[in-house]
Amino acid sequence: MSVKFALTATPNPVKFSPLLYCGPVENAFRKAAGFGYDGVEIHLRDTADVSAAGVRKLMKETGLAVTTLGTGIAAFEYGINFAHPDAAVRRRAVDHVKKFVDLAAELESAVTIGLMTGKAGRDAARETRISAAGECLAECRAAAEKAGVTLLLEALNRYESDYIVMQEDAADAARKAGGAPYRILADTFHMNIEEKSIAETLKRRADVIGYVHFADSNRRYPGSGHTDFAAAVRALRETNYDGYVSFECLPLPDPDTAARESIGYIKKLLAL
Ligand code: LER
Ligand code: MN
């Protein structure tokens, strides 16, 4: 098994978020290289917030990959998502994600779709919104397939989503949207809230898991809460997971400590 490690970064000014490095991505690349990571996961409001050529240069200099481009900041900042009742807003959301797909093709990265799926509500229009979101997911799939880019559909806990909450929901939605290049992104923070067992779920849906987010139960770096990462790591080992484990945790007590402790703790568990 060769799990690879990524840390999370954004060039956008975000207040309190589970991203390790906020500010110029160059800093995140240098830190990632220094702490022994294999890649950097970049969250963006807009593709124009980074220079593709600049990021490619950093990739070359450090030997690190860009693992995936997160679209959640865009969904939040622009109020756009796939379940929005206004078709014009859904259109903007899809067009925005397509720009991420184009950038991902240039960076040989994937694109994450999580908060961008929005909320379907609990009223009479719920099913209509879910089906409209399904059409958005399918349109993104077509663009990604053409560009040779993997899409990572992420289930979020009940406070952040109301229709893609369990890993099973994400696997279902990905399948209904046409399947590959869709894979699902399994995040231990959300799974700790929603799934019966993180380890069992990682094993059960290993067929479709393409990426993993690690954060502890309190969303701090692994080892800071009560999530059983030894069991999670065993599940990844048993299923021969060879993708990325990315640390999407709060930058506490400070980004460097969280980045160093995260990878150190999980590498130790992998060696057991
Ligand atoms: C995004 O990867 C995620 O996990 C969400 O909870 C964003 O905050
Ligand atoms: Mn996540």
Image (tube, grey):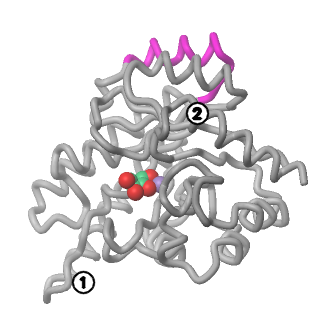
Give the Cα separation between the discs numbered 2 and 1: 44 Å
What residue is at 19 percent from the left and 52 percent from the top? 80
Q: Measured along the vertical axis of the image, is residue 91 above or below residue 78?
A: below
Q: Position of residue 67 (x, y in %)?
A: 57, 37
Q: Residue at x 30, y 30 (%)?
A: 12
Residue under the point 38% across and 17% down: 51
Image: 89 above or below 193: above
The magenta stretch spans which residues? 51-65
Q: Residue at coordinates 29% horizontally, 24% vertically from top-left?
A: 48
Q: Which mark is residue 127?
A: 1
Q: Residue furthest front?
A: 253
Q: Residue 263 colored magenta?
A: no
Q: Is mark 2 within 8 Å of ligand 2?
A: no
Which quarter holds ligand 1? bottom left
Query: For the residue labelled by badge 2, is the local secondary structure a helix, a strand or a loop?
Result: helix
Are the residues tagged 2 and 1 within 8 Å (C-beta)? no
Rendering coords of residue 9 (x, y %) = 46, 33
Residue ID for mark 2: 257
Camera-side residue of 139 and 37: 37
Seen in the picture, residue 6 relative to 240 is either above or below; the reply is: above
Q: Position of residue 244 (x, y in %)?
A: 66, 46
- Respond yes or no on whether mark 1 lies under 8 Å from ligand 1: no
Q: Quadrant for residue 86, please give it.
A: bottom left
Viewer-proximal residue, 151 or 143? 151
Residue 183 appears in the rendering: no
Q: Secondary structure at mark 1?
A: helix
Going from N to C along the chain, the mark reached first, 2 or 1, is 1
